[in-house]
Structures are given as C-alpha cells and as structure tokens.
Image (cartoon, rainbow, N blue to C red):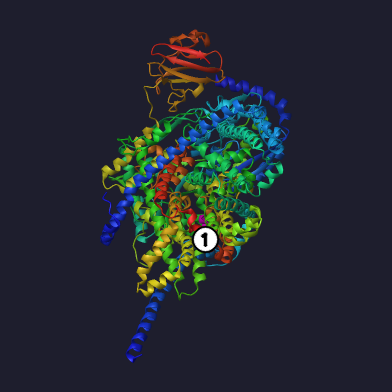
Amino acid sequence: MKKLISLVLALVMLAGVAAVGEGFAASYDITVWVAEEIKELTAQQIEAFNSSNQYGIKFNATIEAVSEAVAADNMVNDVEAGGDIFCFPQDQFARLVKAGALSKLGVAASEKVTAENAAGVVAAAKSGDSLYAYPLTADNGYFLFYDKSVIPEEDIDSLEALIADCEAAQKYFAFEMQTSSWYLASFFFGTGCVSEWTTDDAGTFISVRDTFNSPEGLIAVKGMEKLVKSPFHLSSSKADSFESNAAVVVTGIWDYELAKQILGDNLGVSDLPSFTVDGEEYHIGSFNGCKLMGVKPSNDAYRQAALHFLAQYLTGEECQMQRFNAKSWGPSNLVAQASEEVQANPGLAALLKQAPYSVPQGQIHGSWWGIAQVIADDVKLATDEAGLQAALDNYQAKIEELFTLDNTALLFVGAWNGWNNADTDKTYYLASKGDGTYALTFDVPESGYMGGRVVNPGSWDTDKGFAQVTEGADLIQDLGADNPDNNIVFAAPGNYTITWDGEAFSIVKN
Amino acid sequence: MSDVKVQKAMKQHMGLTASRRISNTAIYIVLTVMSVIWLIPFICIVLQSFRVESTWQVGYVIPRQWGWNNYVNLANTDFWRWYTNTFVLAILTAILQTVIVLCMSYTLSRFRFKMRKPLMKFMLVLGLFPGMMTMIILYRVLADLGLTQKNSIPGLLLVYVASSGMGYYVSKGFFDTISKSLDEAARVDGANRFKVLVKIILPLSKPIVIYTVLTAFMGPWGDFVFARYISMGTSAGKNVAVGMYDWLSQDQIGKNYTMFCAGGVLVALPVTILFLFLQRYYVEGITGGAVKG
Amino acid sequence: MKRYSDLEYLRLSKLQKFLYRLESFFCSIPVAVWHTIKKLGLAIWSFIKGIGLGIAEVVTTFKNGSKPTRLSYVIMGAGCFAHGQILRGILFLLFEIVFIFYMVTTGAYWLSMLPSLGKLGPTKDYNVILDVYTTHYHDNSFKILLYGVLTIFFIIAFIYTWWVNIRQSKTAEQILASGKKLKSGRDDLRSLVDDSFHKTLLALPMTGILVFTVMPIVFMMLVAFTNYDGAHNGYSNNLFHWVGLDNFNTMLSWTSNTSSGAQSYAATFGEVLTWTLIWAFFATFTNYFLGMMVAMAINKKGIRFKKGWRTILVMTIAIPQFISLLYVSKMFAKNGLINNFLIDMKWIDTALPFFEKASWARVTVILINIWIGIPYLMLTATGILMNIPQDLYESARIDGASGWQQYSKITLPYMLFVTGPYLLTQFTGNMNNFNVIFLLTGGAPNNPAASNSAGTVGYTDLLITWLYKITMGAESQYYLASVVGIMVFVVVALITLVAYSLLPSIKNEEDFQ
C-alpha cells in the first residue's frame, strides 16, 4: 500500500513540479540557526543554493549562531519565534517532535535521505515510521584522548593500567561520569546492557527495553567503581583539562583541534579501554550519535517545500564534505563517509576504531538523562556489592515509574490521541461519576478515520466498542465487517460526551 | 604633680599607644590579606585577557606572551554591538528607573492617603514571589508586543522599568530622613506639591538619586537568564552577558575563553569607573535609606 | 511559659536572661502567626463587607437618585455632564466606549474560551503536489489564558469606574444641594500637581507593576491548576486544560517509592527547603557580622587609606557576577587553580572535594558567598556606624568600658535595631539567590535519593534553582514550577510575617520623621 502511494506521488510530482515550479519563484526571508563555527560556511552554502536551484527560489537568510543544545531549548520554548531551519543534537529529537517543532519530511525527501545516509543516523531522525529531520553529522561519539608523555602506548587498552598511570603521575583521568549520562552509559554498553526506547509518530514514548539492572549491569558498575573511586578521576569531558593536570580525557571529535593545540605531538587518540571484572575483560562501549537539521512547521506549502529543498541541500553530500574540510565535522552521507579524506582523518579513525563497541543512540526518553546521571554518585558512595546493586535497583524503579499505567482506568484510545494506549496523560480517560458510571467529554477532530475504542491503558481489548453502544447509535458509523476491532467510528467531528455504565455506552453530541 | 604620678600617666599613655599600634597592625594585616583574596579573581581575569599564546583555559596565571590580541579580536565578533546594546539599555534604564523609583518612594514617604498602607503591604507581598516564575509569561507578553528577538533591548527596558516601582524601599527610607517641616514651611509659603518636590526635596536628595542611578545602571550588565530567554538566539537583541555567556559553551570555550576574559574586563570598566567616583554618594544613599525603611 | 515581672527579670543571671528572651521569642511566634491570620481574615471580611455595602449603595442611589444619576447607570459620565463637569464626563464616557468596543470585538471571545482553554489544536495537512506537510494553527491556550485574565482585570476596572461614576454624580448633587460650587475641569487638572499629586506620581509606576508584576503572578498561579508543560504547550502540539488540584496532590503526596528508595515529592521538597533555609541563614548572618567587622576595622581611628580598602572590596560589586563567579567556580574545581596550587606546594596529596561532596559543596558556596556579600554589608555598615552618636562611646569610655563591651552594648544593639528590616530582606533575598548557586555549582553534587518526578536535584540546589531546572528541563513542567513557586511564596511569606510582627523598628514609621 505504502509503495503504491509513493509511486502515485512520484508520478504526481513529476507532472506537478513542472506546473508548480513557477510557484516557488519568489524570495523568502528566513532565519537559520547553526553553530557559531559553521555560520559563515552556511551563508556561502545558501548563496550556492540560491544560484543553483532549478525552481528559482531565492532565500534571504539571516543566519544566527545558536549552538545545537540551545537551539532545541529555544524551539521548545516558542516554536513560533524559532528558526525556520535549525540544528540540534539527536537526544533532543523526540522532545522536538513532541513539541511540534519539526515538520515531517515528504515522501520523496524521506526516500532520498534514507538511501543516502548511514542507517543508524536515519533511525535517529525517525519517530515511529516518519522521518522528521535531516542528518547533519554522524560523529557524535566519544573516544580516548591521552598524553603520550604520561601514558605508555601499551597501557591504553586497559582501564586499570590507565588509572594506575594517572595516579602514579598525579594526573587526572577525565571521564564525565557524575554530570552526564551520555558518557556514563558507556560502561553498561561494554557489558552488553541496553536501553532501547520506542516512540510513536507523535514523538511520545510508548515502551522501553532496559537491562541496566542485571548481572551484566552489576559488572558494569564494578568497572565504573574502579574509575570513580580513584582520587584522580575527574568528571569532565573538556579537552582543556589537559592544560590543568589531566593525562587522559574522554571526549569527541569536536575537541580534536583543541587537544592537538595543547598537546601537540604528545596527543594520542584511540578507542576506549577495557576493564576487567572477575578475570573477564569488557571493552567499554559508547553512544554513537549524530546531529540533525530540522525545518519548522508552517502553513504556507510553497515556503515549506522550499525550506525542505534547502535543508536537503545543506545536508547533502557536497555540503557535508565542505563542513568536513573546513571544520572536520564527520559526515553521515554514505558517499562522503567513504571518501579518502574522511577515512584518513585521525580523529574519525579513532571513532571508527571504537565503532564496533558503540551503540546507535536511537530515541531516548528526555527524563532518562536525569535518572541515569545519579548512578555514578550512587556508585561512588557504595561501600559493598549490595550498595552497587541498590544503585541499579533505584535506577530501575525510576525508569519503571515513567511508564506507570493505571491499568484499571478506562482510556478512550483512538485517532484523537494518536492511538497511544500507554497514554499517561489523563485527557482521554473516562472519569468516574461516583455512581458506577464513567464519562468523558472530548473533541473529535476532523480526520479520515474518526474512530477508537475504550481500553484499559496498556492493553488492546476489543470488548468496549461499537457493539456496546446502546444510545446515540445514529452518531456513529456502522462499518460491519470493516470494523474487526469493534471500534466506535464517529460520523462527524465535534464535541461528544460518552458515558459507560459497565455494560453499555451512551453517546451524546454537544 | 608628683613624679610618680607623671611616670604612671606616661606609662599608661605609652601602653595605650602600644596596644593600639598592635591592634592597628593586626587590622592592616587582615585588610591586606582580604584585599589579596578579593582581588585575585579580578587580577587573574585581567591577566588572562592579555594572554596571547593560547585561547583556552590554562592551569597557570601569568601569560607567557602578552598582547592585545583578545581585545582586537572582539571586533570580529558581535561583541561591540552587544556592548552598545547594553550600554544604551543601561543608560535608559538608569534614567527611567530613577524617575519611577523616586516618584514611588517620594509619594509613599510624603503623602498620607487612604490606600498608602495597603499599597505598601501589597507590594511587600508581591516581592515575596520568586521572579523566576513569571519569566515565561513576560516572554509571551513581550512576544505579542513584538519586543523579543531582535527587538529585545526595548523589551528588556520595558520590563526593567515597569517593575522597578517595587524597589522603592531604600529611597523611601532616605526621604523619610528629610525633615517634613521643610515641606510644610514651603507649603505655607504657597508652593504646590510639585514645586516642593522640585525646589526643596530633590536638591537635598543627591545621594539617593545617585544611588538609584548607579544600581539601575548596573543591573542590565549582568542579566543573562531573562535576557537570554527574550533574545531567543537573535544576535542583534543580545546584551553583553548573553552574548558572552555563549562563548563558554562546549563548542566555543576552547576558542573564545581568553576573549571572554577580555570582554569581561571591558564590561567591568564603566561600572568600576562610576563606582570609583560616586562611591561616597552610594554609601550615603544606602545608609540614609536602608537604615530605616 | 512562665512570665517574669520586670523586677524578677532583673534578678536573673545573664544566662537565664538570655534563655528567657530566647524562649519568649519562640513562644511569640505562634501568637504572631495567629494574629496575622486573624488580621488577614478580618481584612477579607471587611473587603467582602465593603463590596456588599457598595452594592447596597448602588441600589439605594438608583432608588433615590435624580435623573442624571440614574442615567449614569447606563451612560457613564451622564451625571458629570449634567452638573457641568465636562472633562470628567468625557473621560468616563470614553472609558465606557473603549470597554464596550473591546468586549464586543475580542474580550467576549477570550472570556468564552477561558473555561475550556481552547477547543482545537493544530492540524496537519499533506500537499500532494508539493509533497510537503503543512501545519495549521488554531486555538492557543496560552493566549486564551493570558487575555482571559487581562479581560477579567479590565472588567473589574470597569465595574470600579462605573461605581465611581455613580458615586460622583451622587456626591455632586449633595454638594450642589448644600449650595457649594463643584470643582471645574481646570481645578481637577490643577489638583494633579497639588492635592492629588500622589495620584499623578503613582499612576505610571503602578500601571507598570500591575501589568508586568501582578498580572504575570496571577497568570502563573493559574498555571498551577492546568497541565501546561512541554507536551501540552497550548499552541504547536497539544492544548492545555484545567486539571483542578491534581498538581498540588502530586506535590504534596508523601507516599515514597518503596522499591527504589526514592523520596516522595514532598520529601524532596522538604529537603531542598531545609537547605534553602540553612543557606539563607548562614549567607545572611556570616555576611552581616563579617561585613560589620570589616567596616569597623576600616573606620577605626588611625587606619589609613580608608577609601582605598573600600574601593578594593567594592570592585566585586562592579564586576558582573556571571564573569566573576564563573571564574571563581573554575578556581575551586577539582583540577582548578587552588587544588593544583595546594598539590604543587605538597600541602595535600589529592584534590580537596570542594564541589564534589555534599557537605563540602555547601560550606564552599557559603564561604564564596561571603566574598560576594561583604562589600555590600561593609558599605551599609560604614554609614550606620558613622551615624551612631559619638558621645555614647565617650561616656562609655569614661566609665571604663572595654572595646568588646562598647561593641556588644552600643554598636551591635544599634546596628541590629536599625537594620532589622534590612536583615529580613537580605534573608528572603538569599532564599532566592539564583546567581550564586547557578553559577557556582549549578546545584551539584547530585542527590541520588531525590524523587524521580522532581528531575535532577542537587545538594546545593535552592528552591529557586530547582524551579529553574523544572522549567528548563527535558519535560518543561511549567505547572510544577508554578506549584513550587507558590510554595516558595508561602514559606517566605510566613517568615516575613513572623519577623514583621516581632521586629521593633518597623512599627514606628513616623518616629523618624
């Protein structure tokens, strides 16, 4: 079905573009938010787009230096005032989709992006089955930077040896544990633990598979314990720590230039080391993330389409290579990744060496970062194995709390809440009226399928739906065999009150 | 006077001066140590701003190579625009806020009307709400008025000035210390209230006016939470604190740290100079006012 | 408690006297609170009574009033026109026209939407030809709430003006009946710089306060009763709605998660509150006493370069905190200047955990706060010390009082007396001292036991920085931030009330004039 739609669309587009091409020929005032260091480059790239695009689109762009993390905050605060095109780190993706700050990619754009970029990066730009952003880089991972004058070459594969070298030299081992879950998770990934989250099309988290609290997790915290209990562990991920007494820093490619300037020829880079627990060796894992570029939603179709063309161009192979050449931003485009220059970059080489142990970041619940962050503090305070286990128990309980569903409640799941049967938000719950009946007054928005049914949150029961409606049957459609799930399908949008008395529904239109 | 008595008196006198000398020496030592502690961060910031050999944070204080590079490089950024923004904002805030605060405090100090006490209580209660709470709504109001992003400087001015009436406390205290008989004498001579304010009270209020101007002038230089929220990533609407704060972000700190220090020195300059010249009035103003309220 | 008569009190020993005073202080707190509540109740009652009387007056005036007065019930300013007060009449009429125009054009819409806070959220469309998704925005819960509140403010203002208009017409008649002359428009204008000069002076400041302080506070308090957060931002994703007291229930629930050992929300709130109070206490009093001592040292006879010492200290005020405090926080880092220096000097082997351990971090921020606070206190105290009548010291010296005695019998009581209110504002100011904590530690180190739904809470977090974190955090829980804000208000208000009823120097405002 999907294939067919896209085929039809492609045909329509072929016919359409010629006809509508002139509709684009206009000048658009836009605001673009990019990181400070690529501000000028982006201006040149937009100029190039203006002079080369086939539709006659002219962008009059104001380019603002807004760092990626700040851009996401700003967009969430006020979508209306946000940049028309903006960049953000992938951990902000679900939050931005949820805030309605990202405009979904069209069919053609989705196909192009999926075909041209690394699979892990494409997954990072997806909520449910829909692509909401363009991959910008694929280098948001971390690896080992060290001072060759302090750390002998043969020690870089062992966490214990690194710690011992640092302690002996009275130098710091900088690995951001207490203030960043992004780095902290590396120990867990090293022992095979996972934290995988799923979102629906609207950016809402609907489930998680998290195995941090497991025998493997316990091994991970034992490894972490060795590091955080060392007096020469420094919770930092800044390359300038090399200036103030650090010999090892775990950070990413963005710090490569700075580290090189500070240490010169003494800079060594490599994959992360291994740690040993009970005679068994575990290679520390890592997150493998990316940066994305998004387009703000608007109601002007031409302008919106033009912006999507621009975003597609800015994240295409040519522009990614330009950013790599100018600022060493690691490309996500498969062709660019395969180019010789990229392969030869020492920082990216280290990242590549770490790649087998890294985990694609995917979508992660916004609250997870705060919850996981305290593990290192807990581990540091723990005095025995029970203490370590308690840290994991604490973590797990908090993760479970995120998905606590009241599975005795009655939720009217359907088109209006994006078919989210794990909706913790009470908007579509039937409220008890105290006399054994439950009622909900709500709006049915206009859509192709205005249907749904009442379930206990978390389940997909089919016993409370169309067949149970006794009053107000004239307001709903009888779809017969086309309704295998016993859904109540409204005939018209509007404001309805639905009442459940334990056996039957009555529906009233307000 | 017998010799014995004279000797005793002399001894006493000498003992006194000796003990005073000891205590004064101790005070000098303490004050010197304090001055060093108080000055270290500033000296460090100034020294860092002249460092040429590297642009990131380092583990030593004295630069190995001195120069004006960081100050020169500021011209390549939007720094001077932010600086001008803040300077204009600070001057306008100082003028308007002083007018508002003086109106408010003079009224509450000199007039006795029915709503006076309830009004003062009401403002006391208002002041107990954490200001952070209202940041979001103020943003929305300003956004509706078109005073955010590139227009955030007038927006900030509006918010600073509009809510400044709440800070009447210190200057009211000052006006309270000016004798009421002066007003009454003038009133008997036929001057109206407005004339009393302009001709009699204001000339006596130089310290509190300067105190108010000074505090109002200082405010805008350091606001980075609210100003950042209002400017929403638009460079043209940033004040110097917001603009410079970004230089400390992860991707910029390695490149811009010494420039941050140079900018910091330039930001501190106008306020420090004003303080050096107007310190006396500041002390008189705050003591006249805060002593009683 | 046992109360002593004056004579008995004088017979007590020093320690007993102190204990007695301490006891009576604490015993008077509940009384003070009770008095305040009683006063508050009375105030509310008299307010309600006032409204009742106002309504009664409106009714009787209509019954007994003349034609122009009755007409001004419908057409505002009619009474004024009839009595020749044209200027007032025009103003009243103008206000009525503006009000009606506003209500008809937009006000009615906002009011009608207020109960639901919006019906239709954004909708999405797919443009097949351009292969692009567009979003159409409809209702905006935030604007509905905002303009709804403004409209209600406006209606209240209108009703009040309407009432004034009726009353003025009535009094004008009474004045005319007694044979006196009414004020002309010119008289009205003249009084604006004379008898009613206070109204002129207050008009602008009060408008500002009303729009930019009162209205936002009312709005934010209302947010506490909605589900306004990142997932319901009222415009670009979902509308938000009224949820009644749900948020307060969450906030005040004491049930902790037993399996995780995580605290309940209320327990976390309690912990942050406790630290906030401890912090405010130490931050206020360390600065107060040390600042006073520094001021006395500088002002001591025979000390030279007074202005120089002062200037050095005052530089901390002149340099914006986001520069100086960020630098200081770097100095105290594990690999910062101080630790590296101490290690280089071989005084310590491993770095001191200034910001790493809860107790260390708390002490460190209090100490650094001294560095910031002393200059202010020094300036304030300098002036006050100069104001203490010198003859007090003279006579004390003649009586052979030692330096310490002079301090504890003259300087300290004088200072405490005149700076009572100042201390109180310092205390509440420190409770909300965002900059120091935010710039120095950002709340670190983490408190692992903190409630899950509270977000990341650190051991040095104050309520105000916590509030900031809730607002700016991943979930942007504006509704919870506003609940916390209200709680902060309640706590601060309680402290202020108690202090005000106990402080001696506030009561006699007129004494000083």
Give residue B95's quadrant in the image: bottom right
Left or right, A161 with reference to A108: left
> Which residue has dot 1 on it?
B288
Extreme-bottom residue of the structure? B3
Residue closest to the eye, A142 or C40: C40
Residue closest to the eye, C311 or C178: C178
Disc 1 is placed on an element classified as helix
Residue C460 in view of the camera: no
Magenta run includes residue C322? yes
Q: Quadrant where the N terminus of chain A lies? A: top right
The residue drawn where x is 59% and y is 63% is B274
Give residue A58's quadrant in the image: top right
Rate crowding at label 1 as few (under 14), some (14 to 19) or many (20 or more) other CA atoms within 10 Å: many
Q: Position of residue A368 (x, y in %)?
A: 42, 38
What span is colored magenta in the figure? C319-324
Q: Is residue B274 above or below residue C92?
A: below
Left or right, C357 with reference to C227: left
Chain letter belonging to callout 1: B
Left or right, C251 with reference to C54: left
Magenta run includes residue A455? no
Residue closest to the eye, B96 or A134: B96
**Number of numbered discs:** 1
The residue drawn where x is 44% and y is 26% is A426
Residue closest to the eye, A96 or C219: C219
| Magenta-colored segment: predominant secondary structure | helix
Extreme-front residue of the structure? C179
Q: Position of residue A432 (x, y in %)?
A: 40, 20
Give residue A215's quadrant in the image: top left
Q: Position of residue C362 (x, y in %)?
A: 38, 53
Q: Position of residue C295 (x, y in %)?
A: 45, 66
